[in-house]
Image: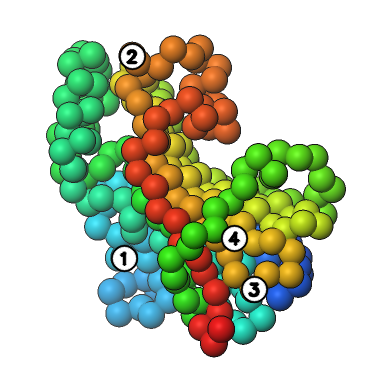
Amino acid sequence: MAEMSLSEIVFPPPKYQEYVFGCWTIKAVKSHIMGSSCEAPTKCDDSTEQPCNLCRYERELRLPSLPDMVFASNLLQITHRSGGSISFNCLDALKCVNDREDTIQVAHAEAWKEARADCEYAKKVVKPYDWTFSTNFRGTVDGLKVSDSTERIDLQKLKIPEEIVFYDEVFLYEDELDDNGSTRCVVKVRVMPSGFFAVFRHYLRVDHVIVRVNDTRLYSPSGASYIIRETSSREAPISKLNIPPPIYKNPDQVWQHLPLVSETVDKLSPEDL
Ligand SMILES: [Zn+2]
């Protein structure tokens, strides 16, 4: 067998899906998990303009560690005919993770450390960064105008069964916190005759301590040249959740049981409108 490079052997090519809906084009890219070592040791140094994904992450992020599963090439991008877009990718999501602990994090970490004093993983908590990889990422907006919105997304209307003409689900990162819970970022999109709907969700569960869901929902009705964007942050200590584990371990179900902590609503539209 002829000699092949590592990338040729291990990695299948990325999968692309694209769907045009009125003045919007929705693109999803799904690729392999990023490796844990440099892909081009002879080429990647501080002067390289295009380092491999891992070196780029280490250069651009100030986090002392990365989630176990990083999908560095995955992308969901929604682009208006004018060229403006909103996109969701792993690097930008991780850029919104605190490189220091906030007071809430410390409080939870203390409770968690106390509950698991004999656990090796608890020692990691003392590191001054958000070891849960909680992100307040709301999508990278490029060339779209962000303005206040009085219009809200009608979630009840979205529950009405309708034909789904396009669907995709794109993972950005995931980590099992050394078997002590789960932190994951996923973005999903679906297009129906009445409009398109996307949800970017960060789900965090630290066992015995907390469940948190940060969601950013996008909705654009058919024919509209704007997107309503709603971001909500919900969380509760597990001790105060009166729901069974199969529900609080399910990111797609638990958010409905969590109290709202904060919310932001705005609207994205082409700059020339
Ligand atoms: Zn590299």
* Residue drawn at the location 18% of the way across and 43% of the way down: 102
For marks 4 and 3, the one nearer the N-term is: 4
**How much space separates mark 2 and mark 4, taking CA atoms?**
35 Å
For marks 1 and 2, the one nearer the N-term is: 1
For marks 1 and 4, the one nearer the N-term is: 1
Residue under circle 3? 225
**Mark in front: 1 vs 3:** 3
Residue under circle 1? 60
Q: Write down the quadrant of residue 158 in the picture.
A: top right
Left or right: residue 230 versus residue 81 is left
Image quarter where the N terminus lies is bottom right
Left or right: residue 207 versus residue 200 is left
* Residue drawn at the location 40% of the way across and 53% of the way down: 264
For marks 2 and 3, the one nearer the N-term is: 3
For marks 1 and 3, the one nearer the N-term is: 1
The disc placed on residue 76 is 4
Disc 1 vs disc 3: Cβ atoms closer than 8 Å?
Answer: no
**How much space separates mark 2 and mark 3, taking CA atoms?**
44 Å
In the rendered view, tell whether residue 18 sits above or below residue 133. below
Q: Nearer the viewer, residue 202 or 50?
A: 202
Q: Element type at marker 1?
A: helix
**How much space separates mark 1 and mark 2, taking CA atoms?**
37 Å
Q: Element type at marker 3?
A: loop
Residue 88 in sight from this viewpoint? no
**Mark in front: 1 vs 2:** 2
